[in-house]
Image (spheres, helix red, strand yellow):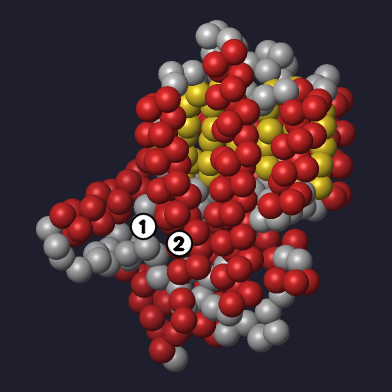
Amino acid sequence: MIEDFAGRTAVLTGAGSGFGLECARIAAARGMRLVLVDVQQDALDAAAAECRAAGAEVLARRVDVSDAGQMQQLADAVRERFGAPHLVFNNAGVGSGGLVWENSLADWQWVLGVNLWGVVHGVRLFTPMMLAAARADPAWRGHIVNTASMAGLLTPPNMGVYNVSKHAVVALTETLFQDLRLVNDQVGASVLCPYFVPTGITQSGRNRPGAAASDAAPTASQRIGQAMLDKAVASGRVSAAEVAHKVFEAVAGDRFYVFSHPQALGNVQSRMEAIVGQGNPPDPFAQRPEVGAQLRAALRG
């Protein structure tokens, strides 16, 4: 729980766009010192310039969050410049769709590298720093927020790699919450599970490094999945700025689960009921059967 953000330090990955940028704007407005992290240099430069113009002290770093060495260098730079951060937002993420057996090894390595290992690195590097600061000062407060997805609580078809990465982030963050409660009362944790929100993630392939490129052309299922996802995300009525405000409310209120679309939790309840009742996974398109019919027709045609 952080009640007073002024003068505190925030580390935000994926800060060049989407939730990261909107949280950076809120943090700057609340008087925080910012460590902005992104892999896209032009977006990072623009975010840093905007936050500095708003009066914030900014350390901007181009970092591939999947790279352990680069993340270690980031953590060292943060410690040297600001000391232990009070807020860590492990938010950088990428998307990939298609039938789960059609994803290439490069797809798996890229998505899990950013979505899961980026969070792992953020947790393993910054948590010890935060706990040390808490031990040294009983008044010190910190919070870690990891970005997962509603896809971390559900299993929508034709996007298995993404689902796996986000389920892992939910499990990691829930465990982090429990582990922190064992050892302290000063550092908290939250998991952000957004639904369809326009953030730019559907174009995340623009930052896919050459080493993670796939030699194969996109499959039919991947092309279909991309088109449907583009449409769903573009039609989202909840903005990234609104979600960012929910993140800060959760940090201030020490609330763990952060949802952009609480109304979608009915699907989570159906899944949990199927698990407890030992039934088969429920129809993911029960509430929108026309979408399921469209996808089946496209894949079978």
The spot of residue 111 in percent (x, y) is: 59, 63
Residue 154 marker: 1
- Please say whether residue 167 is visible from this viewpoint: yes
- Please say whether residue 230 is visible from this viewpoint: no
Label 1 sits on a secondary structure element that is: loop
Residue 163 marker: 2
Relative to 20, is 153 above or below? below
Q: Residue at x 45, y 46 (%)?
A: 172
Circle 2/circle 1 CB separation < 8 Å:
yes
Instruction: Report whether 82 appears left or right of 247.
Output: right
Amino acid on which the number 2 mark rests in the picture: Asn
Q: How many marks?
A: 2
Instruction: Report whether 4 appears left or right of 152.
Output: right
Amino acid on which the number 1 mark rests in the picture: Leu
On-image quarter of the C terminus? bottom left
Alpha-carbon neighbours of circle 2 within 10 Å: few (<14), some, or many (≥20)?
many
The spot of residue 237 in percent (x, y) is: 52, 45
Instruction: Report whether 134 appears left or right of 38.
Output: left
